[in-house]
C-alpha cells in the first residue's frame, strides 16, 4: 500500500487507544506503521538493487519483529538520555511503547500482502512471494474512512486543520486528475462524486462538537469498517477467481494447460478484476467483470514465456544482471524480441503482466536488454 494509507492506519490505531499506553505512543505508531519501508534506502544502490530488495527482509516476519522492537527501544533510550541530562524521571513507558509498536508494525506487511505486488514473509530462509490480490495499491475508500475518522477527532486547532486541508487537497487531486484519471477508470465519475460528497459531509460533521469529542469511538469504528471492507473484498476475490477458473478454457490455447492463475484488483472497482493465466508456453492477460460468463472476443492478449524461447539472443539477455533481478521479481514474466532478424543489435524486452505489456507502450515494470547480433548468434539461429 502507499505510505499515506500506512500513516493513516498508524494514526487511527493511536487515536483508537494506543496513544494512552505511553507518552510518545502516537509518534511510535506513525513511524512503526511505515518502518518496513526503510528498505527505500536501497535506492542508493540504484533501481535494480532497490527492486531486488524492496519488500524484502524488512517486510518479513523476522525483519518486522526486529523493527517493532528497535523503534520503542530507541525512544526509550532517548528518553533516558534526556531525563539524565535534565535530572528528572523518565516519562516513557517502555512496555506501552512496545505494544503499540508491535501492533502498528504488523499492519504494514499485512496490508502490503493484500495487493498484487506481494511480500516475502519468510526471508531470509525462503524467498517465496505471497500475494493477497485483494486491494489495489492505492485505495480511495481507505483514505476516506481512515482519514475521515482521524480528521474528525484531531482537527481541533488551526495548525492541524491546515495539515488536513493539505492532505485532502493532495488526495483529491489524485482522485480527480491524477493516477485515477490515467488508469482508464470505467467508473471515474461515480467515484469522484462520492469523494466530493464525502468531503462535504466531513466538513459538516467537523462543525459538530459532539463528533470531535467522541474519543476513541470514531477511530475504532473506522478500523472495524476497514476490516469488514477487506473481508468483503476477499469474498469478491474468491468469486472472481472461481469465475476465472470457469472461463480459462475459453482463453488458453487447446494444446496448453494453465499452470498459474491470478485475479487481481483494479482501481476503485471491486466488480472488475485483472486476470492473468500462465501456461508452460504463454501468459494471457485480460479483464473480467463479475457476473459475465464469457470473456469478450479480442480482449485477451498473450505473450510467450521467457523460458519458452529457444534462442541465443534470449540466452544472452537472461545473463544480464537487470534481467535476472527482474525475472526473480516478476510473477508473470513475458518476453519479446524487438527484431529477431537483426544484423547488429536488438532489444529483448521483459515485462510483468501484472502491470504492463512489452512493446512501445511499455510501463514501469519492464526491462529492455540490448543484445548484440553478431555472426555467431545469427549462424546459430
Image: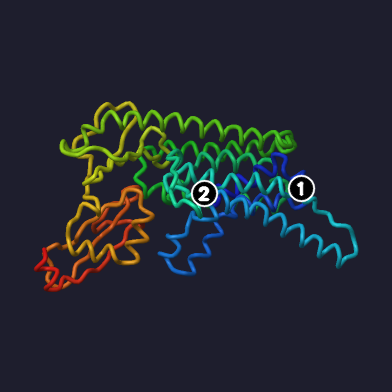
Depth check: 208 or 229 in front? 229
What is the crowding at mark 1: few (fewer than 14 residues within 10 Å), some, or many (at least 20)? some
Q: On the rendered structure, is 221 left or right of 269? A: right
Mark 2 lies on residue? 171
Q: Position of residue 10 (x, y in %)?
A: 63, 47
Can residue 163 be seen in this snapshot? no
Residue at 21% of width from left, 50% of height from top?
304
Depth check: 168 or 375 in front? 375
Alpha carbons under labels 2 and 1: distance apart: 35 Å
Considering every residue shown, the one lying at the far front of the view is: 125
What is the crowding at mark 2: few (fewer than 14 residues within 10 Å), some, or many (at least 20)? some
Can residue 12 be seen in this snapshot? yes
Q: On the rendered structure, is 145 left or right of 94? A: left
Q: Position of residue 355 (x, y in %)?
A: 35, 50
Residue at 76% of width from left, 48% of height from top?
95
Depth check: 57 or 341 in front? 57
Q: Position of residue 183 (x, y in %)?
A: 36, 47
Up-down relation of residue 137 to residue 40 (above or below): above
Which of discs 2 and 1 lies nearer the camera? The answer is: 1
Task: Report the disc number at residue 330.
Answer: none
Up-down relation of residue 370 to residue 183 (above or below): below
**Do callouts 2 and 1 mark residues in contact (Cβ within 8 Å)?**
no
- Quarter of the image containing the C terminus? bottom left
| Badge 1 element | helix
Q: Position of residue 96 (x, y in %)?
A: 76, 46
Q: Within the image, what quadrant is residue 376 found in?
A: bottom left
Earlier-in-chain disc, 2 versus 1: 1
| Badge 2 element | helix
Considering every residue shown, the one lying at the far right of the view is: 87
Q: On the rendered structure, is 325 left or right of 234? A: left
Mark 1 lies on residue? 95
Amino acid at each position: 500500500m502507499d505510505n499515506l494509507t500506512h500513516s493513516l492506519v498508524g494514526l487511527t490505531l493511536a487515536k483508537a487507544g494506543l496513544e494512552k499506553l505511553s507518552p510518545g505512543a502516537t509518534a511510535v505508531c506513525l513511524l512503526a506503521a511505515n518502518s518496513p519501508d526503510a528498505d527505500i534506502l536501497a535506492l542508493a544502490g540504484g533501481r535494480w538493487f532497490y527492486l531486488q530488495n524492496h519488500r524484502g527482509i524488512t517486510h518479513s516476519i523476522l525483519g518486522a519483529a526486529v523493527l517493532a522492537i528497535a523503534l520503542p527501544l530507541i525512544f526509550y533510550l532517548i528518553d533516558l538520555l534526556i531525563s539524565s541530562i535534565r535530572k528528572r524521571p523518565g516519562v516513557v513507558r517502555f512496555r506501552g511503547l512496545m505494544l503499540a509498536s508491535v501492533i502498528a508494525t504488523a499492519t504494514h506487511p499485512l496490508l502490503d500482502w493484500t495487493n498484487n505486488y506481494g511480500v516475502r514473509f519468510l526471508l531470509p530462509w525462503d524467498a517465496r512471494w505471497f500475494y493477497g490480490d485483494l486491494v489495489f495499491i492505492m485505495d480511495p475508500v481507505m483514505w476516506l474512512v481512515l482519514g475521515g475518522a482521524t480528521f474528525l477527532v484531531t482537527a481541533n486547532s488551526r495548525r492541524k486543520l491546515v495539515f488536513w486541508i493539505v492532505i485532502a487537497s493532495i488526495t483529491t487531486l489524485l482522485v480527480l486528475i491524477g493516477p485515477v484519471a490515467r488508469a482508464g477508470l470505467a467508473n471515474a465519475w461515480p467515484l469522484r462524486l462520492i469523494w466530493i460528497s464525502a468531503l462535504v459531509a466531513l466538513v459538516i460533521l467537523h462543525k459538530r462538537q459532539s463528533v470531535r469529542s467522541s474519543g476513541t469511538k470514531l477511530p475504532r469504528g473506522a478500523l472495524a469498517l476497514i476490516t469488514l471492507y477487506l473481508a468483503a473484498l476477499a469474498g469478491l476475490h474468491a468469486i472472481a477467481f472461481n469465475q476465472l477458473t470457469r472461463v480459462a478454457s475459453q482463453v488458453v490455447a487447446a494444446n496448453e494447460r494453465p499452470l498459474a492463475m491470478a485475479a487481481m484488483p483494479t482501481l476503485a472497482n471491486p466488480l472488475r478484476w485483472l486476470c492473468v493465466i500462465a501456461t508452460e508456453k504463454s501468459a494471457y492477460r485480460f479483464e473480467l467483470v463479475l457476473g459475465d460468463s464469457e470473456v469478450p472476443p479480442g480482449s485477451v492478449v498473450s505473450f510467450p514465456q521467457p523460458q519458452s524461447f529457444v534462442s541465443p539472443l534470449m540466452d544472452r539477455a537472461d545473463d544480464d544482471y537487470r534481467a535476472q533481478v527482474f525475472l526473480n521479481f516478476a510473477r508473470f514474466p513475458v518476453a519479446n524480441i524487438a527484431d529477431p532478424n537483426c544484423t547488429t543489435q536488438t532489444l529483448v524486452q521483459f515485462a510483468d503482466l501484472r502491470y504492463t505489456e512489452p512493446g512501445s507502450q511499455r510501463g514501469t515494470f519492464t526491462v529492455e536488454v540490448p543484445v548484440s547480433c553478431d555472426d555467431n548468434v545469427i549462424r546459430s539461429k
